[in-house]
Amino acid sequence: MPSYDIGTKIKTENWSLYANWRQGHYIEPFSGGGKTGEFYEYDDYTRLNGVGPGLGWQSQHYNFSFEKQLNNWFWHQEIYLDQNEIKALVVVDPAIKNYSAPSWKEQSLGVLSSFNIQTENANYVFGFQYDAMEIKGSELLVSTSGSELRPIEGAPELLPEGKESIASIFIQGKYRFNDHWLVNIGARYDHKDRYQNENIKDLSPRLALVYSKNEKFNLKLSYASSFVDATFWNRFSSLPSFQGSENLKPERLESLQLTPTFTLLDKNLLISTNIYYNELSDFIFRDNNADILGPNYINAGELKSWGLEFESQYQHDDLNFKAVVSYQQAISSENYGETNGNVHNVPSLTANFISTIAVTPNSDFNLIMRYIGSQTSPIFITGEVSAKEYYVDPALIFSANYQHKMSSALKMKFNLHNVLNHQYEQGGTTVHPYPQQGRSVKISLSYKF
């Protein structure tokens, strides 16, 4: 199954049309069904429509946008359409070569309209968005002991052919009191019509107060509250080991942040530190210890944490350097994976360093260094392995990009990921950490007509 990512964009002064077609296949490193995490032989399983063990997908995205400036009014409109098809082959039990093939199609259609008004001391934004999603069909085939894939007689659909929609209105006002003080207040109201569940009505506010002493220093204090609903798959999947729970509640995050920023060396150097406190509640989690009848997805509880993000960027002539360092620590948790302040399978310390040099007027080179700190990644395999204090080692990953403008219309980009082919792992809701991507090469071409 070949992978591709093709896109095109047509743009005039006021409108643009964008289309993108993608196809890909992710091969699971270990079995993904049943107990999960077992070794298997890829060639032991027949292909289904050219797809072997793992996750295959095809997607199409279309977007039409229109913008218009009328004095101090700015009007923006979008209409978009997304079509997705998932085709997977899940290894359930390698010992007897049992596997399953879940697949489904989904489509979403949406519209977004916003108005931006600029005055001498203020800026106002208001608008609405509507998005409708529909499951167009699904299928679950199974194979026992290497037999041909076939439907399960009398089994329920993998996913019901259901529809959901969400309508939203939003408003934001930014007002400057004087040369030193600025306030930003906004809110978004969402009404979601859920399939066979209680509808969601939610108000998400945000507030920011900014103090600017001069061009070299400013301080921002902000608060925001937001939610993310459980996916249709999380709530209605009938696939064993991934059975959904219809009554899942949305995830909610409340965040308080303090951000001092310095601009130095004739605006060539920017230094910013973001100190935050987060409260995450009703986080959706896959329960590996669930009963065979499920459900496997639950609202895990809550997690309170604090952290800081340090960002520095320096620009001089043809050189650009950017560094980002993040640290986080859990304060408390309820029914959530956390040990001694370390969130399970999430590094407490991460860092990224990006250097960019303009090699010629038409080309530049990027070197990217990524540090992923050690992680607490408990291993739970009933009856076989139990390593509650297992840690994933830290990793240092180097990647490089080269971009060249071959003509006024043709651009080429060469990406080399994980240059040193460093072997490292990442944990999650699987029973043990999985190996991550090694060295890979990607070449992209874009042409502007």
Image (cartoon, rainbow, N blue to C red):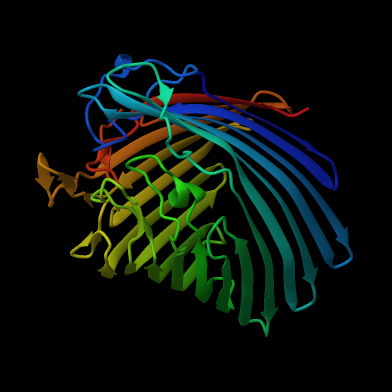
Q: How many marks?
A: 0
Residue 89 visible to an observer of this rendering: no
Residue, x 38% and y 71% (percent of image)? 279
- For image coordinates 50% across by 65% down, the residue present is 227
Is residue 151 at all visible to an observer of this figure?
Answer: yes
User: Residue 10 falls in which quadrant of the image?
Assistant: top right
Residue drawn at 25 percent across, 32 percent down: 423
Compared to residue 415, the image places residue 297 above or below, namely: below
Q: Position of residue 286 (x, y in %)?
A: 33, 51
264 left or right of 395 in image: right
Residue 341, image x and y in percent?
Answer: 22, 65
Left or right: 241 as drawn, with respect to 432: right
Q: Image height check: is 229 above or below 93?
A: below
**447 vs 54, nearest the viewer:** 54
Quadrant position of the C terminus in the picture: top right
- Residue lying at the far front in this picture: please name it: 154
Q: Position of residue 297 (x, y in %)?
A: 36, 53
Vertical relation: 28 (above or below) 282? above
Residue 255 picture location, percent across and down: 45, 71
Q: Quadrant of residue 342?
A: bottom left
Decide if residue 201 is on the left or right side of residue 236: right
- Front-lying residue, 220 or 103: 103
Given residues 446 and 185, the one toward you in this image is 185
Q: Nearer the viewer, residue 110 or 260?
A: 110
Residue depicted at 62% across the width and 45% down the height: 134
Q: Residue furthest bottom?
A: 177
Q: Is residue 348 left or right of residue 279?
A: left
Residue 199 occupies quadrant:
bottom right
